[in-house]
Structures are given as C-alpha cells and as structure tokens.
Image (cartoon, grey):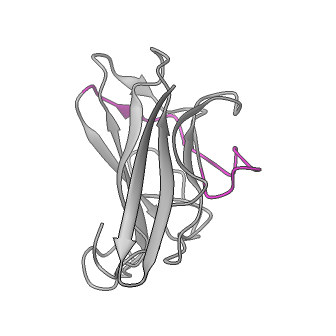
Amino acid sequence: MTMLRGIICRAGAIGLFVVTISSALSAAMLITEFMALNNTVLRDEDGQYSDWIEIFNWGTNTVNLDGWYLTDNAADPRKWTFPATNCPAGTYMLVFASDKNRRKAGAELHTNFKLSGDGEYLGLVMPGGSNVACEYAPTFPPQVPDVS
C-alpha cells in the first residue's frame, strides 16, 4: 500500500486525511478527482448538478469494472457496484454520486449515494469487496462549492 498524507489548512482549521492507494498490480484504478458540492460545474443527463467522482486507469491494460465498487462508508465496501464496463488504459471515467443508482454500461453511471460537502470516507474497492484500490480515509476534508 502507498499512503499519501495531506494536511488541509483553512482559516482557523487544520485537518489531516490519508489517501491510500493499493500497490497490487490488478489495482490500476484510482480516484483522481471528485466534487462533493457541484452547484454550477457539471450537469448530469437529467440536467441536475449532481456530485461526481472521477476514476483513472493508470495501468497499461483495459480494466473491466464488473464487480468493482464505490462506497462512502468504510463499513460497507460493496455499497455501489459498477456494471460490466471497460475503462481502457490511460482513460478517465466519471460516475455521478447522485443517489440515483444507475448501472447501465454505456450510459451515465450514478451511485446510490451522494457525497457530503462536510467530508466523509470515499473508497474504490476491487472485486470481491475486501481489497481497497484507493481511499480517502478516515474522511476527505470539508469541500468548497464547485471546486474539485
């Protein structure tokens, strides 16, 4: 496991969070960006400004995301399951964290949870549900509207 630590400093507040990235060869997927307070930046197919999570395949092979998971709860690593969809090497995939629970390959993907602007756990979990590929733990820091 590779751990990246971040210290967040804002007026009157200091916070610590850890981004953990699995070093397993099969874990070529990362959460590279997210927006927990999307008020004006990106609309989903329904015209709503839903929260979103961006993942990236940093590997050299296409990854079929069938059986991978996104979660906002470390105690529930299988909270939302990706459909059988491919993420080619070197590409990004956007998943809306809208609580709409849409899992149709080839269409916009939507988790069954929203992100908290106050900060919370966020994880990308490998098939089987016991190995975390990438996580913001124990929580990502409080967010600013329209900033990822």
* Residue positioned 49% across, 59% down in the render: 16
User: In the rendered image, is residue 108 in sight?
Assistant: no
> In the rendered image of this protein, does residue 54 appear above or below residue 43?
above
Image spot of residue 13 (x, y percent):
45, 78
Q: Is residue 106 left or right of residue 73?
A: left
Image spot of residue 98 (x, y percent):
51, 71
Q: Is residue 146 magenta?
A: no
* Residue positioned 71% across, 30% down in the render: 130
> In the rendered image of this protein, does residue 105 appear above or below residue 24?
below
Which of the two residues, 124 or 64, is positioned nearer the viewer here?
A: 124
For the record, the magenta segment spans: 71-89
Residue extending farthest to the right is 75
Q: Please identify the dominant SS of the magenta region.
A: loop
* Residue positioned 47% across, 24% down in the render: 27
Query: Which quadrant of the view contains residue 77?
Result: top right
Which of the two residues, 142 or 66, is positioned nearer the viewer here?
A: 142
